[in-house]
Amino acid sequence: MPSTDPPATIRSSRWWYLIAIIPIIELLMASIAGATFFLVFALDQTQILGFNETTIAMAMVLLSIVVFLVMILLPYAVYRDLELLEEYVTLTQWRFDRHQFLIGAVAGVFLPILGFGVALYYLYQRHHHVGIP
């Protein structure tokens, strides 16, 4: 009977770190955007920590660009991680469909809430069947 312990290549894989960072970054971005919206529009604060609306808007655009660039890496990270797992999962009960995960990850680049869901679901399934993370 073959061992079901993950091989060294899976234990040393770090692609799932990038997948795990996606929900954290999206929650952080949503929190910052929500707080900014609340302060600027709801409380009519034109100065936040000494910065005017234009400076805050530019910072939000820059932050959005950074989040988008990280989101572009989600499909590649999912692809690389699934590629490493493919041989190992033949020993487990996880029957993943690589195409479904990749389509969800690509769509998640343009629909952040979908990327959030794909990342969490992938990490849940990976943990349940592989044990890492």
Image (spheres, rainbow, N blue to C red):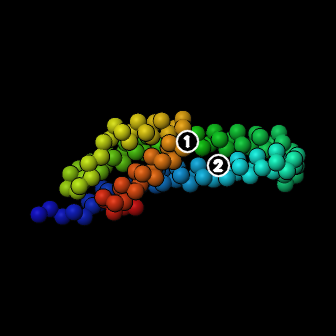
Classify residue 35 as left or right of residue 83: right
Label 1: how many Cα within 10 Å (few below 14, some 14–19, many 20+)? some
Split into 4 quadrants, where in the image is the N terminus?
Answer: bottom left
Q: Position of residue 31 (x, y in %)?
A: 67, 53
**Mark 2, other Cα within 10 Å: few <14 / some 14–19 / many ≥20:** some
- Note whether 83 is above or below 130 in the view shown: above
For mark 1, give the secondary structure.
helix
- Nearer to us in this view, 31 or 65: 31
Would residue 93 be found to the left or right of residue 15 on screen?
A: left
Where residue 14 is drawn, which disc sits there?
none
| Residue behind mark 2 | 29
Residue drawn 26% across and 60% down? 7
Residue at 48% x, 48% y: name it.
117
Q: Quick one: quadrant of the C terminus?
A: bottom left
Q: With 30 as the anchor, is 74 left or right in this view?
A: left
User: Which residue type does callout 1 highlight?
Assistant: Pro
The answer to whether the residues at label 1 and label 2 have Cβ atoms under 8 Å apart is yes
Q: x, y (%) of residue 123?
A: 41, 54
Q: Which residue is mark 1?
A: 112
Classify 3 as above or below 123.
below
The residue positioned 27% from the left and 52% from the top of the image is 94
Q: Is residue 45 above or below residue 1?
A: above
Decide if residue 67 is in sight here.
yes
Of pointers 1 and 2, the one earlier in the residue sequence: 2
- Front residue of 11/33: it is 33
Mark 1 and mark 2: Cα distance apart in space: 11 Å
Residue flagged by tag 2: what amino acid is it? Met
Q: Give residue 60's quadrant in the image.
A: top right
Give the residue at x 64% y 49%: 29
Label 2 residue SS: helix
